[in-house]
Every structure is written in C-alpha cells, then in structure tokens.
Image (cartoon, rainbow, N blue to C red):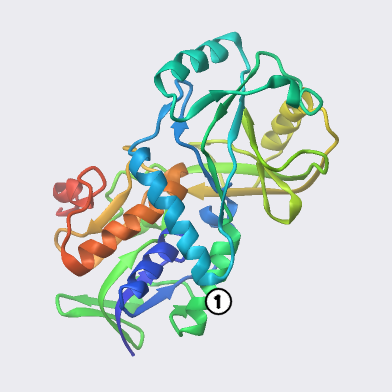
C-alpha cells in the first residue's frame, strides 16, 4: 500500500494534521495505539487568551484564536458534531494583589478582560475579593473530536491501531517503508513519546504531569469556566473537570492522593454547592523549555517531520500549526520562525 504521508499519533496534532492533509487531497495513514490516558484525552479543552499571574496575552493569540475557532467549527461539520462553544473564564481573585493585578491589566487588555457582577455568583461560591471575566474564551469537546475523527479515518482505511516501532520502519531519501506500507514522508505527532524519538529526542522537551478530578456538581451553571487556583471546567456527560497541577518531578503517571486531598480542600473552601467525585485522571503533557511548538522537518532527513511540543496551549496552537505544516509540506511555505524546528538545526544535525 502506498500513501503520501504516515502520521504517528492521533492526538490533537495528529488529528488536525491528517484532516488538513486529506482536505488538501493527500492520502495518509495514521498510526495510533489509542492510549487511554493520552494528553489530549485528559486535557480540559480550554482556549484562554491570557495567562499567568500578570494576566498577559498568550503568544500570538490574536492570530491563533480566530483561526482555531473557525477550524474547530469546520472540523465539527466534517464529523457531524459541534466541537466548540464560547465559555468565558470567571477569575475569582484569591488575594487583594490578584484583584489589583486584574484591574491594572484591564486598562491595558480591554479586548479580553472585563468586570462582572459578583452578586450573581454568591449563592454558588465563597467570594473573597471579587471576580473578573476573561472574554472570549472557548471550550473544545476534545473527546468528541478524537472519537469522531477516528471513525472517519477508519472508514477511509487511514488508521492503524498499533504501537509504532522504529525497528519496523526503513527510512531512506527515496521514501519511508513501515511494515507493508510505503510513504513519501513520515510525521511524528507522538506527544511525550517524542522524548525517546531517535530523530527528535535532542529537542528541549520538558514534559510535565497534570491531574484532574471529574466531578458531578448538578446545581452549578455550565455556561462558564470558574478559576481560583484550580479551574472548574464543564466536561462531557454533564460533569465538570477540576484541575490541574504542573508536576515537573514525578515517579509515575498514576493519580495521587496528595492532589485529590489538596483539590478537595480547595473546593470546600470555595464552592458552596454539594458535589460528588466520579473519577481522577492523570497524564503527561509534551511541553518544552521554550514554550513554543516544534513544527517542521528534520534538517538532515527532510522526509521526516514533527508537530509536537504544544504543552498546555495545544487547543489554540494545534489547528494553526497543523495548517502551517501542511502548507510547508505541499507548497514550501514558511513556518513561523519561533515554531519552525529548523531553529534547532545545529542540535538536530549532531
């Protein structure tokens, strides 16, 4: 069997890249082992245009967010389900300093920050120092995207459910051979497996572990995301996703009692409503030291590429950079210089 491109991984990056390439008339084979705890499956699915304690705009968000909104809408049409909804963040100020920082940024970021009526939320939460609103924010139905696109790929004979093993692959300047499959190029969208990828392991990956509780809160309105240290995010099946941590040193990827206990304590101090814990999730994110994605082709092996390193901003980054990589592969158009993997040419050429 011959295809244009083999894609390793069907997370958010692999899904968007395969969708973009197929839309451009290319044939693909996606190789994915369907891990139950992949980063995309455990992520909250939030696009937030500001970040950090200083509440500054995230990198390139004025370009990334409009593109992402349209891309998720079009992707949803392709798989017959709605994938995106506006779901603004209510930022509950935990300290007077937090409130002051928000008020100061409000003068400088009027596009994304606004005040809200605290009294509306007093019966749901303990409110100490007021609430600010981040608007617009977006919520992506990641599970529906992964499942819906997987069905489409399988219907097109474009998915192989297995672990990709390098010993099964032969790479030469003339093309790629994997088992009985031949392709022009091989693109890795393999998340944290990229740390052990022989072609890209020298990139400055800095993976971290995140955890979340899945909770039933029947009386809490679902039109907003609530944030005060932890975030309460509407989840599938009428539940809420509550998290998340950033652990840089960890023994394994199992959920921890320490996270559960700490999150329960925070909830009890903040939320006035009764709740029930339904599940506890943990996963590893493919972040990197620079907090910029890895996009493009290997400097020595130009038929081997990567779309990875999205970290916690994958929902806003993946659609745009899958599009850029598609344009690069098919038309040679340039990739954003701060995302192009060629910025590590010297390292990857060792």
Classify mark 1: helix, strand or loop. helix
Q: Is residue 177 above or below residue 256?
A: below
Q: Which residue is mark 1?
A: 151
**Count of marks overlaid on the render:** 1
Residue 23 placement (x, y as % from top left): 36, 73
Q: Is residue 215 above or below residue 135?
A: below
Residue 114 placement (x, y as % from top left): 54, 24
Quick check: 261 left or right of 161? right
Residue 82 showing in the rendered view? yes
Residue at the right extreme of this rendering: 274
Q: Which of the pair 238/201 is nearer the observer?
A: 238
Q: Residue at x 17, y 66 (%)?
A: 331
Q: Residue at x 34, y 36 (%)?
A: 59
Instruction: Give the quarter of the image for residue 180.
Output: bottom left
Q: Classify the position of the N terminus by image quarter.
A: bottom left
Residue 91 placement (x, y as % from top left): 60, 26
Q: Which of the pair 282/57 is nearer the observer?
A: 57
Q: Residues within 10 Å of mark 1 (few under 14, many from 20)?
A: some
Q: Is residue 205 above or below residue 57?
A: below
Q: Which of the pair 350/51 is nearer the observer?
A: 51
Q: Residue at x 17, y 59 (%)?
A: 333
Residue 254 placement (x, y as % from top left): 63, 48
Residue 310 showing in the rendered view? no
């Amino acid at each position: 069997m011959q295809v244009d491109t083999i894609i390793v991984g069907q997370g958010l990056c692999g899904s968007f890249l395969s969708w973009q390439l197929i839309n451009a008339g290319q044939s693909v084979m996606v190789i994915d082992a369907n891990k139950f705890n992949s980063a995309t499956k455990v992520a909250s699915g939030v696009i937030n245009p500001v970040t950090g304690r200083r509440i500054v705009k995230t990198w390139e968000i004025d370009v990334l967010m409009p593109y992402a909104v349209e891309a998720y809408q079009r992707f949803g049409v392709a798989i017959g389900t709605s994938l995106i909804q506006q779901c603004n963040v209510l930022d509950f100020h935990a300290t007077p300093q937090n409130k002051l920082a928000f008020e100061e940024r409000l003068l400088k970021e009027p596009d994304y920050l606004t005040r809200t009526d605290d009294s509306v939320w007093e019966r749901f939460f303990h409110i100490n120092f007021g609430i600010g609103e981040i608007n617009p924010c977006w919520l992506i139905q990641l599970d529906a995207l992964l499942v819906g696109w997987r069905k489409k790929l399988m219907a097109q004979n474009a998915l192989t459910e297995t672990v990709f093993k390098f010993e099964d692959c032969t790479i030469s300047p003339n093309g790629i051979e994997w088992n009985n499959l031949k392709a022009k190029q091989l693109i890795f969208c393999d998340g944290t497996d990229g740390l052990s990828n022989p072609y890209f392991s020298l990139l400055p990956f800095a993976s971290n572990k995140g955890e979340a509780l899945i909770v039933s809160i029947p009386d809490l309105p679902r039109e907003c995301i609530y944030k005060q240290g932890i975030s309460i995010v509407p989840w599938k099946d009428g539940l809420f996703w509550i998290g998340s941590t950033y652990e840089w040193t960890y023994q394994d990827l199992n959920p921890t009692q320490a996270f559960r206990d700490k999150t329960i304590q925070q909830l009890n101090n903040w939320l006035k409503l009764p709740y029930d814990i339904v599940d506890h999730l943990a996963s590893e994110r493919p972040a990197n030291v620079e907090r910029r994605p890895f996009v493009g082709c290997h400097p020595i092996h130009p038929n081997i590429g990567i779309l990875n390193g999205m970290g916690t901003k994958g929902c806003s980054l993946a659609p745009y950079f899958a599009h850029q990589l598609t344009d690069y592969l098919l038309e040679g158009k340039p990739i954003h210089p701060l995302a192009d993997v060629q910025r590590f040419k010297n390292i990857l050429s060792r």
